[in-house]
Image: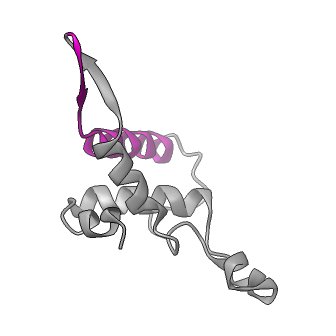
Amino acid sequence: MHPAQTYAVTVDVHILETFRALVEAIIPNTPALSVYGAESSAGAVDLCIHEYMIWELDHNLSLVLGFYLTVIPLSASTATLLNAGAVQYVASGQAQCAPNC
């Protein structure tokens, strides 16, 4: 089992749901393509890409603080940024449907 799967259990639910929504919007589940094989219909959520993104943001990106590279967990701040952008998008009236539709 990849460490990202066990790590996802410890992550805040709001962060997990934000990244799940992001990857579902980019690569949705497409059951109509299952006639070509199961791998053709799987979406990013089915492949746990959101868990991998959270793991990478929290463990493998480094920022220079002072004179040294420091690993800083970035999934929480990235989720906050994504949520703020989603709020602005819905408030602008450009969304085709209401959130959670």
Residue drawn at x 38%, y 62% as measured from the top left: 51
Residue drawn at x 23%, y 69% as measured from the top left: 9
The secondary structure making up most of the magenta span is helix
Is 68 magenta? The answer is yes
Is 4 magenta? The answer is no
Image vertical order of residue 36 relative to residue 85, above or below:
below
The reply, left or right, for residue 42 in relation to residue 69 is right
Asked where in the image residue 99 lies, by quadrant, the reply is bottom left
- Give the magenta range: 67-91
Residue 49 point in image, percent of width and height? 48, 62
Q: Quadrant of the N terminus?
A: bottom left
Determine the residue located farthest toward the bottom in the rendered image: 35
The reply, left or right, for residue 38 in relation to residue 79 is right
Image vertical order of residue 85 relative to residue 47, above or below:
above
Residue 30 point in image, percent of width and height? 68, 76
Residue 95 point in image, percent of width and height? 57, 52
Determine the residue located farthest toward the right in the rendered image: 36
The reply, left or right, for residue 44 in relation to residue 10 is right
Residue drawn at x 43%, y 39% as measured from the top left: 85
Asked where in the image residue 96 lies, by quadrant, the reply is bottom right
Residue 11 point in image, percent of width and height? 22, 60
